Amino acid sequence: MTGSIVTEPSDAIWPGFTRKAKVIRLVLIDDHPIVREGICALLALESDMVIVGDAGDIEAGVELVRRHEPDLDLVICDLTMPGCTGGNAVRRLCQECPTTRVLVLTADDSLECMRESFAAGAIGYVRKDALRVDLLAAVRRAASGSQAICRGVGETVMRAWLQSVAAPPPIADAPLGPEDRRILRLIALGVPTWKIAADLSRGVKVVEKYRASLLRRLNLTSTAAVTQFAVSSQLLSREEVDQLFVAD
């Protein structure tokens, strides 16, 4: 019939009434313009999502979030941007905009960055190589207040857990250079990769690869294993370990 309104059966509660889906208001923060444009275009295709603004750095991002609070549902934020790496972006957003939910969208799939992001206050973590359906599901779940990850992150966490269960013993007599010893000590002390990179005047990606290679060579699959190895190798004293627990 001409002029009639057609609704999906699941949306029609009674004749003349249609359920209206809540629109999720989003802010996107990423330093790559083409990435921002692509994600904005993808999310704009969804009837229940609207991008109210995007920014290319954390300073502009914080101002944008402040402008749209308290009506903002979710901030989608990269981890690595000029002047802000690791969980610092998440921490800054959560401290300065405490009512905001932050979903991390990053190319970094390291367990350390995942832990640091959630510890800093993130509600979700999605890799940039995730499927479109995974990203959309994570956005909707995070916007509703539930923790969200993509399948790739879940697989990484599961793989790390399985490796830790059946991990071979560390190689106690492996030769260690001065830089190896320094990095192992910093990892055992809980220093994040971005801070290690700054201390060594190296790029974050370079240190991430070096760290991964070093731990793989020593069969160390967790921070706890690194700490135990550091103590047994006299890279860290028992007193320093006790101070770590006191600090926690």
Image (tube, rainbow, N blue to C red):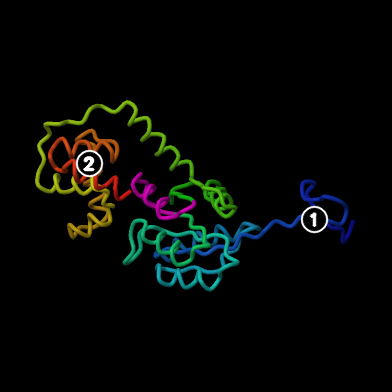
* 1 relative position to 52: left or right: right
- Residue type pointed to by label 2: Ser
- Tell me, yes or no, whether the highlighted magenta stretch contains residue 195: no
**Kind of element beneath mark 2:** helix
* 237 relative position to 7: left or right: left
Mark 1 or mark 2, earlier in chain: 1
Above-or-below relation of 151 to 65: above
Above-or-below relation of 21 to 9: below
Q: Position of residue 153 (x, y in %)?
A: 43, 43
* 176 relative position to 186: left or right: left
Magenta span of residues: 105-123
Q: How many residues crowd around disc 2 within 10 Å: few (fewer than 14), some, or many (20 or more)?
A: few
Above-or-below relation of 198 to 219: below
Residue indicated by mark 2: 213
Q: Position of residue 26 (x, y in %)?
A: 55, 62
Q: Position of residue 114 (x, y in %)?
A: 39, 48
- Residue type pointed to by label 1: Thr
